[in-house]
Amino acid sequence: MNKIANFLNQHIDGNVYISNHVLDAFSTDKSIMKIRPKFVAQPTSTTEIRKLVRFSHQLAKRNVGVGVTVRGSGNDKTGAAIGPGIVISTTKLNRVCEIDVRQRLIRTEAGITLGELEAALEAVGLTLPISADPSHTIGGLIMNGHTGDLSGKYGSILKYIEQAEIVLSDGEIVRTELLSRRALRKKKEQKDLEGSIYRTITSLIENNPALMEELKKKPGLSGYRNINQLFLGRRFDLLPLLVASQGTLGIMTEVILRCEYISPNSSYFTIAFKNLADALTFGDVVQKYDPASVDFYDLAIFDETAVAGKPMNLISKLPSSGYLISASFDNYKKRQRKRIIRKLSKKYKPTSFATAVDGPSHETILKNIIGTYLNSTSARPRLPLIDGAKVDIDYLAEYLEGVGQLEEKHKLSLPVFGSLATGTYSVRPGIDISTTSGRRETLDLLRDYTDMLYKIGGTICGDSPEGRFKAIYSKEYADAPALKELDQAVKEAFDPHGVLNPGVKIDANTRSSIRNLRTNPGKGIIKE
């Protein structure tokens, strides 16, 4: 291993590490899995990433498997940011290359964090309307197809990507762009891997029209279902296929993003209901006012945080049980926001379970309360096992009933929190995975939860792909063998030698994934 590390260090300006403390630090992400890499590389440029990938590619051609896993901030909750081969950290690829204020475009390296990006944009009056932890890298958000609280109004991150630079599995570069029929034909005539990819992908689309239509009806981010979005009229763009691919089709190194003008402030209307029917009725009403977000919480969450010293003081009096909805409005003109809040207050304030405020303090208080809930000092930590289920609003009542049944069966507290605007919901079970019984309990709950979602037409891959962990009991291919064949063909087209993030998404192996579950509780702050 020293010889390989020395060889790689001679060919890049960045560093390749094999010391135990570095390998241990990169053996976990925000999931409950642990895989120790053989090497950790911190390249400083796209060229160096190409060299590392080309090295892995050459070994793979000789049947020596040293796969490449790309990692941003290590915030992935599905095990997709860890791997047994070379882990490439993009932390040094964090430059803002240029900003075009007039066209609202920013070109940046993929390792920049959302916080760093927003700081650069704020200086020129722009923002990327994405709701996520500021420590997430842009590359990580894109490769996980991020769907945050603001997606209901502004769309997912895919909507804001103009162009991306991708390192392919053989170390060559693709720059995505919207191609005319003539330009696409020229791409397909190329004799390299890029040409082969364009030929294969267009053939898969053209030869499977019924499957492309079926994909439009399937929710979630599993597999490579964005393949049905590549033809835009008479034009073609490879980009949607790479979004949510979790580094299994290519490594994003640079991206051009389209931004929005900053809204000066937000106003909030928060209300609690004793029963779900009233909460859903309010959800329908509030959607007519074009909210930026509509967050949904089981009131049991606030009961638990009150015990930890964080009472819900936004509303003077809460019902003993029920649901809380907090809607935010970011209209540019303050008088428009005031008009909306006035109408909602007039209708709902008499319930005494409602409050209206202007400014960011409201959101901060809510986030602090949720942070307390997620990071309680319980011996059974609340880990992100089954975050981000996608549930159609028409089946939300059945979903909540199903979660209640799981609470009884598994003797767990599973209060739901999520977004009515995006239809994504999470539960954080308190399970001690440091014990054999705890790990068995984790797998049993995941199986039952996935089965329940499948029966109501939902998916466990609502706001993130399957990675390694969610793939253990994924139901996406249960009734669709043709879909699995399609996804396998896509993967083989991009990565014929299995270099990129092996063991993730369709390559996930149930036995291997279970074997790599952590034997100790997660460390550090767990974030929503």
Image (spheres, rainbow, N blue to C red):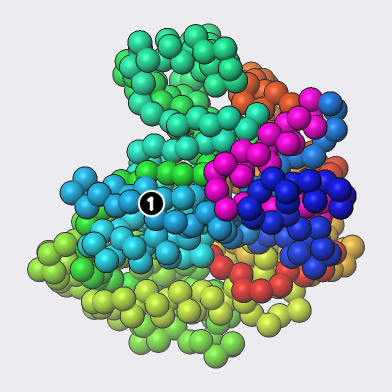
Residue 239 visible, this angle? yes
Q: Which x, y percent locates residue 157?
A: 41, 46
Image: 77 above or below 166:
below
Left or right: where 479 falls relative to 354: right
User: Which residue extends farthest left?
Assistant: 335
The residue that mark 1 highlights is: 97
Q: For this rendering, which residue is in front, 62 or 305?
A: 62
Count of all numbered marks drawn on residues in the image: 1
Instruction: Confirm whether the magenta stretch covers residue 325.
Output: no
Image: 109 above or below 224:
below
Q: Which x, y percent locates residue 191?
A: 57, 12
Amino acid type shown at disc 1: Cys
Q: For this rendering, which residue is in front, 398 or 416?
A: 416
10 Å neighbourhood of mark 1: few (<14), some, or many (≥20)?
few
User: Which residue extends farthest front?
Assistant: 10
Span highlighted in magenta in the image: 32-61
Q: Residue at x 35, y 66 (%)?
A: 119
